[in-house]
Amino acid sequence: MTSSQAQRVIRKPGRGFRPYLLIPKVLAMAVYFGAMVCAAVLWHVQIGCKPMEEIDAATLMQQLMTIRLLVVCVGVPALLLTIVMGLLLWLEHPKTFLRMRWVRVKLILLGLGIPGFHVFMASRLYHFRHTLESGTIEQSLKNQLTLGFTLLLIWSAVIIWLGRHKPRLWQNWAKNYKSKTK
């Protein structure tokens, strides 16, 4: 049976690469967040919530290397792909995007969070691994890493929320950007 109506939902050519960039960005962000959640759950269940007396050094080293591989081999490449796709999306309309407060807030959070979490978590994991190799486990380093994983998950969730919901953040477009035609 054929329809006499013309199809009106066909995507017109020349509308840009937005859908081709947005889908890989969303998938890469999901992989990044999934890797961070897995690493945080592994840390909290195997190391963070246990008393120091119940932790075996050999098992702890194996769990630490598993978490490191998960973050380095899955999380970081997914985050880099997300950043590249987001930058390419931003380059479509940079002036318009920079006017939006949620984009500015997101860029500030990304600019401070990525290097900050990298330096903090990498240095804490490095010191934790070396104290573990020497045969001791420091409670303060364990607590710092537990707090770091928790804050990293909260930060990542805020970044995802800003990108998904695009809140106005008290921005009034009619007041701030008046029309020049009168």
Image (cartoon, grey):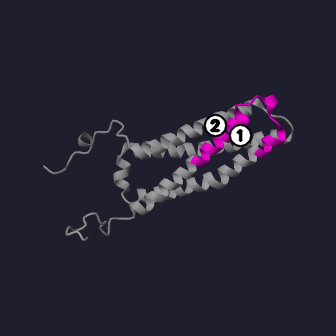
Q: Which residue appears at 79% of the width and 30% of the height?
A: 52
- Helix, strand, or loop for circle 2? helix
Q: Quadrant of residue 23?
A: bottom left
Number of marks in the rendered image: 2
Q: Which mark is residue 124?
A: 1
Left or right, residue 15 beside residue 87 = left
Residue 78 to residue 53: above or below: below
Dot 2 amino acid type: Gly
For residue 79, say whether it is visible: yes
The rendered magenta stretch, by its main secondary structure, is classed as helix
Relative height, residue 5 to residue 95 (above, below): below
x, y percent for residue 56: 83, 37
Quadrant of the image containing the N terminus: bottom left
Secondary element at tag 1: helix
Q: Can residue 120 be seen at all in this image of the molecule?
A: no
Residue 157: x percent and y percent?
51, 41
The mark closer to the camera, 1 or 2, is 2
Residue 22 picture location, percent across and down: 43, 57
Instruction: Please provide the residue range marked out in magenta.
Output: 34-62
- At label 1, the amino acid type is Arg
| Neighbours of disc 2 within 10 Å: few (<14), some (14-19), many (20+) | some
**Residue bearing mark 2:** 148
Asked if marks 1 and 2 touch (Cβ < 8 Å), the reply is yes
